[in-house]
Image (tube, rainbow, N blue to C red):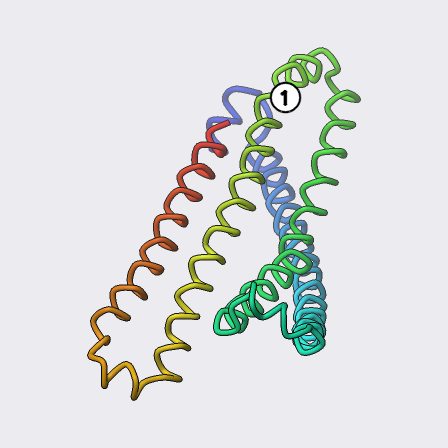
Amino acid sequence: ITGAGSLLSGNGAEAIGQMINEVCVKFTVLGAICFVSAWIAEACFKSSGLRQSAAWRKAYIKAIVRQDVGWYDTNKSEELSSRVAESAQAIEEGISSKLSLGTRYFFQGVVGLVLSFYYKWDMALVLLGISPMPAFGAWYMGRATSKGASDIADAYAKAGGTASETLSELRTVAALGLEHSQQEKYSTSLEAARLAGVIKNTKVGFANGF
């Protein structure tokens, strides 16, 4: 590379080599700064998410205990543990890593847009004209993710309810010979969760194409 640059530009080999070394050092320092900053941000958001998730779990349990008897007629008690775990996990992901990434990508987009208009406004206008396509992809990805997460949570809640019901009434299930029936019911719920995950990931992959 040094020899080719010397022949093409007429500069000395040492000057070009020194310039390349300086650029490599700058990129290395910049990469180290970005790594440390990203690690600190992710650690702070993650620890905050874990603490808030624990607080939400306690609040969720307290709210369930305060409900009237009639509330349990419309909400299956054996599914509550799975729903609490799924909801708390979704909240933890939303306010930790997802919030960190969303903040980072938002400012990257804003700063990139400002710099593009500053250095090359005509090219920035062309790119801004086709921006609705990736915007639609981002909207569709968010919609598919939320819908898929809801379907997966419902399926896992049914599976958890079946498992809790079977284990709590294990003697009755064994006496009536319902092991195979409960197994099929549990497998059906897991299959529904798997299909919901496949559909969600297919839609997310389609959205990434934009």
Residue, disc 1:
131
Q: Compare residues 98 and 123 and report the one nearer the observer.
A: 98
The relative height of residue 209 versus residue 100 in the rendered view (above or below) is above
Percent x, y of residue 115: 76, 28
Number of numbered discs present?
Answer: 1
Q: Residue at x 46, y 29 (%)?
A: 209
Q: Residue at x 35, y 53 (%)?
A: 192
Determine the image quadrant of residue 57. bottom right
The relative height of residue 189 versus residue 134 in the rendered view (above or below) is below
Q: Is residue 102 left or right of residue 207?
A: right
| Disc 1 residue type (three-letter) | Ser
Percent x, y of residue 87: 59, 63
The relative height of residue 29 versus residue 21 in the rendered view (above or below) is below
Q: Is residue 52 left or right of residue 179?
A: right
- Residue farthest to the bottom? 171
Q: Residue at x 30, y 58 (%)?
A: 188
Percent x, y of residue 175: 23, 86
Percent x, y of residue 62: 70, 77
Q: Compare residues 54 and 174 and report the one nearer the observer.
A: 174
Q: Compare residues 128 and 63 and report the one nearer the observer.
A: 63
The relative height of residue 175 versus residue 95 in the rendered view (above or below) is below
